[in-house]
Image (tube, grey):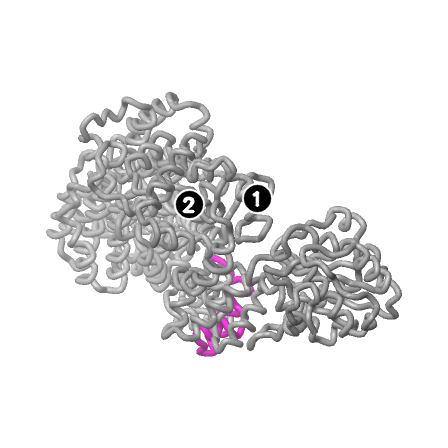
Amino acid sequence: MTVPLTGDPLLAAKLAVPFHAPGLVRRPRLLNRLALGTRGPLTLITGAPGVGKTALAASWARSASAADPVVWVTLDEDDTPGVFWAYVVEGLRRSGALAEDDLGTPVCADDVDRSLLVRLASALELAPAPLVLVVDGLDKAPGSAVPEGLRFVSEHAGPALRLVLISREDPPLPLHRYRAEDRVHEIREHDLAFTRSEAVQLLRGQGAAPDDHLVDLLLEHTEGWAAGLRLCALAMARSADPAAFARSFTASEQAVSDYLLTEVLAAQPEPARELLLRTGILNRVHPDLAAALTGRTDSGRILQDLARCHAFVEPLPGTRWYRFHPLFAEVLRAHLRSRQPELEPLLHRRAARWYAEQGRSAEAVDEAAAGGDWSFAAAQTVQHLLVVPLLAGSGASPSADTFSRMPEDVPGARAALVAAACCMARQDVEGCRSRLERAEEAPGGALDAEPADGLTAALLRLLSAPGAADEQAQRVAELLARVPSEERARHPELEPLRLYGQACARLRGGRLQPARELLEQAVRACSGDTAVLLRHRCLGRLALADAAAGELTRAEEHGAAALALADQHGIPESHRSGAAGLALAAVALEREELAAAAGHLDQADLLPDTRRDPDLLIERSVLRAQLEIARGGWDAARTHLDGHLDGASAASPGPAARLAVAHATAALARGDVDAAATALDHVGADGAPPSHTVALAQVRAAADHPVQALQLIETAEESGAVTVPDRVRLLLLRAHQALLDGHEDTARDLLVQALDTARPEGLRRPFTEAGPWVRHLAAGLDGRSGSYAWLGTPHAPADRPVVEELSPREREVLQQVARMMSTDEVAAELQLSVNTVKTHLRGIYRKLCVSRRRDAVERARELHML
């Protein structure tokens, strides 16, 4: 049959329900919604190209759900209103809803006779049964004539006619009125996004067999966009490394590039194409920002039109901002680079200035960095105190990664200050110090000229320098008072950061108790999500200080809290501190729980600051040495310590004394009194902590100089800073000397005091280090102290306390591991992602104080968990 008004034949394909492509995913949740919608007068399916609008309607039309007759009409871009209605009339005739001579046909290509629509509505009103008219591609109809005609027919044809309209944009219909009257059922773009289970079906239909993690990655890349998923699945099936493809955002972008350029970008008018290319460099865009990048005054209207026609641009609710689909944004950027490679950095720099004018300094820094304008980025970072969240690790912008590409030779003090802050954020203390020196030496770099510059420099000195903690903290407070109040209010991390820096400096100076007090204040001051990482670090350092003071229970609590906080908030390992793990290892060593200590040390070794921070590096070496000594490996202990001994005199007083005492302890354990004395000589007696004096007393006693040893014991006892472990060692030194002098009763009394002092915290190491005479003397206590029982039977591995109980999910994971299942198999069995299983395993290792699967299983069996 031909269309009389054009003489062209009718195309049967325009009246046929499209066939579905191979691998089509049946989507019951949407089919049911569409079936429900066709019980009413109007169903509207809208969304961007490739979201599955036509596929959904066609799948429904061919399914048993479509109980009523379905007339399908597909619109093309050159279809005039007359042509469209000719196809509608022919489709109704072929369905049997109209007789051959009921209506006639349209006679004008550009319009349709009103009387034809009246006769059509009248004929449909008399239809004996309902029928569904599906109009696919309504957005292609020029003007409003076709939608207006559909509105007229729908409103006058009675309940028999049910319309299903498929479009990339909302048609010009009174949808607000239809919604109020409950006359329209809508399936929108977000409804059409693929769910996890649907994505799995689609990928399997293309021959892929992805695990949960790969599905998560592809869903993240495509945001559930059907065509994107399908194109990625096809490309992944052809890839030699499907897993690498799924992990690569660039690979996903390349897979969909042609589709988006052809179906979306090329379909836009020239002004919209130009705006998309220039604003696609951004993650989101404001009409005024778009105007700054394009020079157009109608940017707001263009963005509205793009959002209305679902061109992968959507408004952010409650704002004037818009966002691009991430894959579309990447395609736009790649297209701009290929056409005008010199334009992208210029646009980023323009965006940086616009953000700075709006007072949005973090975004200004990001855009300046993207445009390679490092001087401007550094100036904004320092001027607006953005180094504070960077140092606190709040996750806010900018981060150290923002400046990872900044060249070393960027001139100016502010660039050097930012470089120093980035080093400090990565726990690279030495790198921070060298760049801070460069900032102070920069031409015209008077760091005190501006409050923000001086405050940044003072804060970095406080965090990285070994001494003058109180002076630097006071300097920070003075400069902070000169900073505008609105800037201070934007950075609540400043005070806990100042306290943390002052506490760390006091720890380096060997002032243990003042440091603990400051760390406790810093923990309390870390409030809100912006200070989570800083709180994690404060808790870890506090746990280390508690352990050094011999308050093992508090150290264990604070260390466990630091680790739990990191797990709870998903802090990545690259940003976690090893201080908490070192503290728990120190606790375990003091209690002679060697397997637990080894497990905590292994976990701490994986974290970057234990290899970069000089103080933690020394602490790690000391604990490794103590573990080897407890195992009888004196040569191995010396290996851990020798690399640091030559630099001990140059280290901060606290770490230097800690290192010297550890070296002396190792030397005494193998009977080398001279080496022990030499190690202690590396640290001057003036200002040394009591632990250094105690170690000297042990050396003098071992060298058979009792008078000198007694003098040193008295000196240490007079110190108000003596720790619990050192108090126990002093009592043991006196007891041993009394025993050697033949005063056995006095020696036993002193041993009882030592045992009673050590028992609350379960301290065993001082007694083990003291030598076999302790057990000989203790054997004659005759019940004088109930404290000897715990010392005589150290915790066996099966009785070792677990820091935290395993969660139900962790127990499930451990049960599968005990069945010799791989990580992938555990993930499949428990329907978890592989990353989630790995996270649970890390938690299990930490809680059971182990570092391997086999050890975890054995430990759990010892504790009757399996």
Label 2: few (<14), some (14–19) or many (≥20) C-alpha neighbours in 10 Å: many
Q: Position of residue 9 (x, y in %)?
A: 65, 71
Q: Is residue 331 left or right of residue 164?
A: left
Q: Is residue 708 left or right of residue 815?
A: left
Residue 780 seen in the current view: no
Q: Nearer the viewer, residue 478 or 628?
A: 478
Q: Report which quarter residue 46 is drawn in.
A: bottom right
Residue segment shown in magenta: 804-832
Q: Nearer the viewer, residue 416 or 660?
A: 416
Q: Is residue 359 left or right of residue 15?
A: left
Counting residues from the N terminus, which is met first, the one under dot 2 or under dot 1? 2
Element marked by disc 2? helix
Question: Taken as a whole, is the magenta stretch helix, strand or loop?
Answer: helix
Q: Position of residue 2 (x, y in %)?
A: 68, 71
Label 1: few (<14), some (14–19) or many (≥20) C-alpha neighbours in 10 Å: some
Q: Nearer the viewer, residue 323 or 842?
A: 323
Query: Is residue 129 within the magenta segment?
Result: no
Q: Is residue 251 above or below residue 300?
A: below
| Disc ID at residue 278 | 2
Q: Residue at x 49, y 71 (%)?
A: 827
Q: Position of residue 571 (x, y in %)?
A: 43, 52
Q: Residue at x 47, y 59 (%)?
A: 260
Kind of residue at disc 2: Arg
Query: Is residue 808 within the magenta segment?
Result: yes
Q: Is residue 635 above or below residue 655?
A: below
**Number of numbered labels in the structure image:** 2
Element marked by disc 1? helix
**Residue identifier under label 1:** 304
Label 1 near label 2: C-beta < 8 Å?
Answer: no
Q: Position of residue 227 (x, y in %)?
A: 52, 65
Kind of residue at disc 1: Gln
